[in-house]
Image: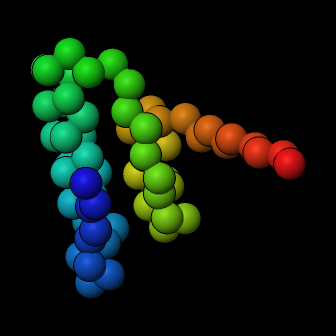
Amino acid sequence: MNIYVRPQYRCNGYGMEIVSWLVNQAKAQGITKIYLESSEDGKGVYLKLGFKEMMDYYKL
């Protein structure tokens, strides 16, 4: 699933509201882990909602 808030509507809480609703729906269905990728612009929303940053490193 992709979530996008158009630039003219950002910083009004819409992204936070959408993601909060989706997280609550997932919890209601018994989902205990959510992994996501975020743009730099969206990272703050996820951090405020309690998501933690993860990095996987691959070496050859």
Q: List x then y, in percent, for residue 53.
A: 59, 40
Q: Residue 34's quadrant in the figure?
A: top left
Q: Residue at point 14% right, 20% down? A: 29
Left or right relative to 11: residue 57: right
Q: Nearer the viewer, residue 16 or 2?
A: 2
Q: List x then y, in percent, for residue 47.
A: 49, 43
Left or right relative to 59: residue 25: left
Left or right relative to 25: residue 46: right
Left or right relative to 38: residue 14: left
51 to 27, vertically: above or below: below
Q: Residue 54's quadrant in the figure?
A: top right
Q: List x then y, in percent, for residue 16.
A: 28, 51
Q: Can residue 25 be seen in this view?
A: yes
Q: Which of 14 and 23 is in front in this view?
A: 23
Q: Nearer the viewer, residue 46 or 12?
A: 46
Considering every residue shown, the one lying at the far bottom of the view is 8
Considering every residue shown, the one lying at the far front of the view is 60
33 to 14, vertically: above or below: above
41 to 47, vertically: above or below: below
Q: In what quadrant of the picture does the N terminus appear? A: bottom left
Q: Residue at point 49% right, 64% down? A: 39
Q: Residue 6's quadrant in the figure?
A: bottom left
Q: List x then y, in percent, for residue 36.
A: 43, 46
